[in-house]
Amino acid sequence: MKNASTQAKHSNGKAPWDGLPIGLPMYRERDLRATFGLSTSSIYEMMAVGTFPRPVKLGPRIVAWPKSHIDAWLADRAEQSQRADNGRRRVVV
């Protein structure tokens, strides 16, 4: 039987979280749903088309998204929204 540290390693011999800072804030799926109002299907649909960051596999059945990846995604969404707003003419009454 393999131990947990062996099971969680990639073929290159490194664990998926190698290189991530210890204590890095992470979002679990339930956190994303509660904090941002995203449904599970929306999260995975956006990941499938490349518009949402992929999670980090922490164990055989555990994934989480680094807060820094979600922050970058939010900043990108805000920038896209800003560009879209700048492209519209505003009517002042």
Image: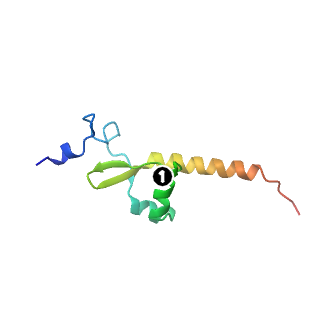
Where residue 61 sits in the image (x, y, percent)?
28, 55
Residue 37 relative to residue 11: left or right: right
Residue 44 relative to residue 15: left or right: right
The type of residue carrying mark 1 is: Met
Which image quarter holds the C terminus?
bottom right
How many numbered discs, if any? 1
Where residue 22 sits in the image (x, y, percent)?
31, 42
Q: Residue furthest top?
A: 12
Q: For numbered disc 1, what is the local secondary structure? A: helix
* Residue pictured at 87% horizontal, 60% vertical: 92
Q: Nearer the viewer, residue 49 or 35?
A: 49
* Residue pictured at 53% horizontal, 50% vertical: 51
User: From the viewer's perspective, is residue 34 above or below residue 4?
Assistant: below
User: From the viewer's perspective, is residue 55 above or below residue 14?
Assistant: below
Where residue 18 sits in the image (x, y, percent)?
30, 38
* Residue pictured at 52% horizontal, 45% vertical: 72
Residue 21 relative to residue 82: left or right: left
Where residue 87 sits in the image (x, y, percent)?
77, 49
Q: Residue furthest left?
A: 1
Disc 1 residue crowd, few under 14, some 14–19, many 20+, Cα 10 Å? some
* Residue pictured at 14% horizontal, 46% vertical: 2
Residue 4 relative to residue 39: left or right: left
Q: Which residue is mark 1?
A: 47
Q: Nearer the viewer, residue 47 or 85?
A: 47
